[in-house]
Image (tube, coloured by chain):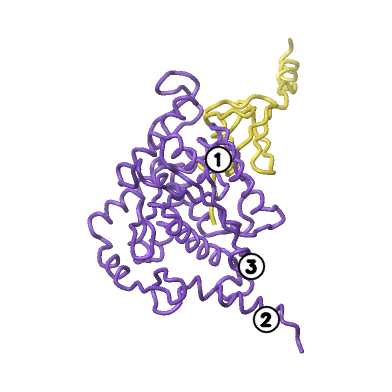
Chain colours: A yellow, B purple
Amino acid sequence: MEPTERLRYNALPVQRSMSAILRLRDKDYEVEAGMTVRDAMLRNGIQPESVIPTRDGELITDDEILHEGERIRLVAVISGG
Amino acid sequence: MKCRKCSQKAVLNMRQHKLALCREHYLEWFPQQAQRFIEKYRMFGPQDRVLVAVSGGKDSLALWDVLSRLGYQAEGLYIGLGIDGGLQYSSTSHRMAAHFADSRGLPLHTVDVQGLEGATIPVAASLTHRGRSKPCSVCGLSKRHIMNKAALDGGFDVLATGHNLDDEAAVLFGNTLNWSVGYLARQGPVLEAGDGLVRKVKPFCRLYERETAAYTLLRGIEYIYDECPYATGATSIYHKELLNQMEAERPGAKLSFYLSFLRAKEAGFFAAAQDREAILLHACSSCGQPTSAPGQCAYCRTWSQVRERVDLALTPSQ
């Protein structure tokens, strides 16, 4: 393979859309799959202490890795007034 | 992450305790903690009749569930506030509380504010200076009065509320920012009984809000998830968010703040303010409940004003 061809080959769009959704109340946050739930929350300004993450209705710890295409529901825990 | 006790998959990681637990062990751990604090702060015993203030929210229903599981004589009190806010907030919360009680065969006492005083909380607030901008002040005042009266009239030994550590830390934070020494002197896991005042206790005062929420979810307790429509923008929520920012960086910050305060109080830092509070109480000329000034208490003054204005509005003009 010629060097120029190799460069072109490496530049091909090999990455797919790797995302997951965090849902908090009525809002969806599209986040990168492959990172932890905690990191995804922090990147989106969601305080990890103020929510409980759930996957398919089951509670999970926030060190869980986000899978592509999945939807994590964050249960808000802060109440008051 | 694995459960510290059995190596099954953990459902909650409590960074402040360096403790992750699976569902089974969490549901064991949580009531054990509540029992520990009930005993540590000498809140009540198995012979005492406990009235639990239930709002239909996660904390109060979790508390009622825990006390029942621990074998205490716990009955519920629900106060209908007449708040709709487009969410049918009060009717939904009442349904949750009633469903919880019915499904467990537990007695629920209900007091409807409109039935008792002739107006809902939002209407009362709109008719008084105390609540013109927001009904929270009238609401808090009314709930405290009604809870105290219901507990005394019902012959209960103690009134238990579902205040958690986040609630306590947020109130403490607000009172510290303002140096409200009188309020600081009164804050604690137990508020002792006085003339006309029932004993008040907070068995969840050292449990994080995340922990009570996790317990409620894991126990499958249905609760009202929506926030009170008037709570939007509340200072207490703002303070909770600030404290949670600290907690994310320094696990245990909220607990340490609260426990340090309790130690300072125990050491007598607020003794002078506590004495002043006790000396200055008078009996309300209308209802007899204690009040800080001679004459009518704030509850009776507020609701007299509301009734007068409701009557005026109903009187046909000549």
Callout 3: helix, strand or loop? Answer: loop
Report the disc number at residue A51: 1
Circle nearer the viewer, 2 or 1: 2
Distance from Cα at disc 2 to Cα at disc 1: 47 Å
Distance from Cα at disc 3 to Cα at disc 2: 14 Å
The quadrant in which residue B270 appears is bottom left
Report the disc number at residue B293: none
Chain letter of the residue carrying label 2: B
Q: Which amino acid does label 2 sit on?
A: Leu
- Which residue is located at x 50 percent, y 73 percent? B300
Callout 2: helix, strand or loop? Answer: helix
Callout 1: helix, strand or loop? Answer: strand
- Which residue is located at x 58 percent, y 38 percent? A41
2 and 1 marks on the same chain: no
Residue projecting furthest to the bottom: B318
Q: Which amino acid does label 3 sit on?
A: Ala
Q: Position of residue B60 (x, y in %)?
A: 51, 46
State the residue position of label 3: B119
